Image (cartoon, rainbow, N blue to C red):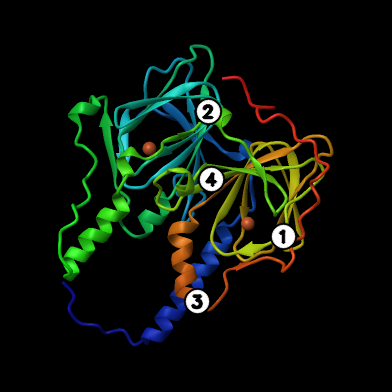
Amino acid sequence: MKTTTSTQVTHYEVQKKRRETLLEEWRGYHKTILKRKDVVMHDDPNRRTRRGVYAGWDGDRPTKNLDATIHELPAGLETTTIHRHSWDAIMFIESGSGWTEIDGVRIDWKPWDTVHLPSWAWHRHGNTNPDKPAVFHTWSVQPMLEQFGVALLEEGGDTPVAQLPPRPKQVTALPGEDPYARRTQRLARQAAGEESARLITRFEDVRGLVTKRGARSLFMVDKSIGFHTAGLSAVMHELAPGKYQSRHRHGGEAWLYVISGTGYSMIDDVRHDWEAGDLIVVDHWAWHQHFNGSAEKTARLVRIHNFDALYDMIRILMDPLNLFEEPPVLDAPDLSDVVWPDHLDGRPEG
Ligand SMILES: [Fe+2]
Ligand SMILES: [Fe+2]
């Protein structure tokens, strides 16, 4: 084992070189529009599904914070294998009908429903339609946990859930004012309600509201509506025909998946066109604004980020630098004359 250092290069030079190559490498990975047709679907014989990677190390598109995967359950698939992991994920159903079982609780779903897969919960999926595959997307914080060395994955095969170990239990709060007791109290508080938290948003049960930014929006997964996530949040934005959202910029990764419609995003004055099936990756600290390209139809986008975890931490560490900016007066369009389509308009059949 080596126990002495003989390098003649100073620590400053080693770090400088490492920092430069890191950014060079990561800039090379960035792509603004990830197209559905470029996502290669692979058979997944281990879990009996098919999957393709929009963004993440599992494909050739490394990310640091979030990943995006598309899954296809073959027609009539009785069940995938069961597994669990230390990261949580959001599941958005694109088409088909089926179910997801989370720690033994079966949840049936239809297109545009959104499911939360909590960290450490055993889960598996099935397709109830014998003639049609079911397709869903997942967005998770797996890369963030991998970065910290705590991304753990456990495969349970076809073992019945009752025979698998339960979710790791958070410590019970201990009485007292000493540092250790305070830690147990804080952690217990954070975990409170986790096992009984909300797991699904059924699309037919929610309604959008027009926001100051200029879109009809609704929460799909967020702690404000009863989910217990590691900072993950998903919102559906519906852009009015021929309209746009107000401009802003921020750090971090915010992704937009296009469910329906066509349009374009102006990102630091460069136009990027998009259509249904595209994932828009807005680069950090770039001014951006999303436009609906159709004068007749709305465009629906799902926005995903985990600002409550990593990004809030970065904001605190970088204070007083401001990491979110919008014009003093929002340049949102006047939507008072817009006739919005029915909420369920355009939703695919189950
Ligand atoms: Fe999973
Ligand atoms: Fe944004």
**Image check: 62 left or right of 344?**
left
**Image check: 288 left or right of 47?**
right
Figure quadrant of the N terminus? bottom left
What is the x, y in percent for residue 238? 69, 41
Residue type at numbered disc 4? Ala
Give the foreground label among 2 and 1. Answer: 1
Residue type at numbered disc 1? Arg
Residue type at numbered disc 2? Val
**Occupied quadrant, residue 317:** bottom left
Q: Distance between the residues labelled 3 and 1?
A: 23 Å
What is the x, y in percent for residue 314? 47, 68
Residue found 64% across the figure and 39% down from its top: 208
- Residue 112 seen in the current view: no
Q: Residue 247 carries which label?
A: 1
Say if disc 4 is inside 8 Å of ligand 2: no
Give the foreground label among 2 and 3. Answer: 3
Secondary structure under the numbered disc 4 in the rendered image? strand
Nearest to N terminus: mark 2 or mark 1: 2
Nearest to N terminus: mark 4 or mark 1: 4
Q: Pointer 2: what residue?
A: 135
Ligand 1 lies in quarter = top left
Q: Pointer 4: what residue?
A: 234
Q: Residues within 10 Å of mark 2 (few under 14, many from 20)?
A: many
Q: Distance between the residues labelled 2 and 1?
A: 32 Å
Nearest to N terminus: mark 2 or mark 3: 2
Figure quadrant of the C terminus? top right
Q: Pointer 3: what residue?
A: 319
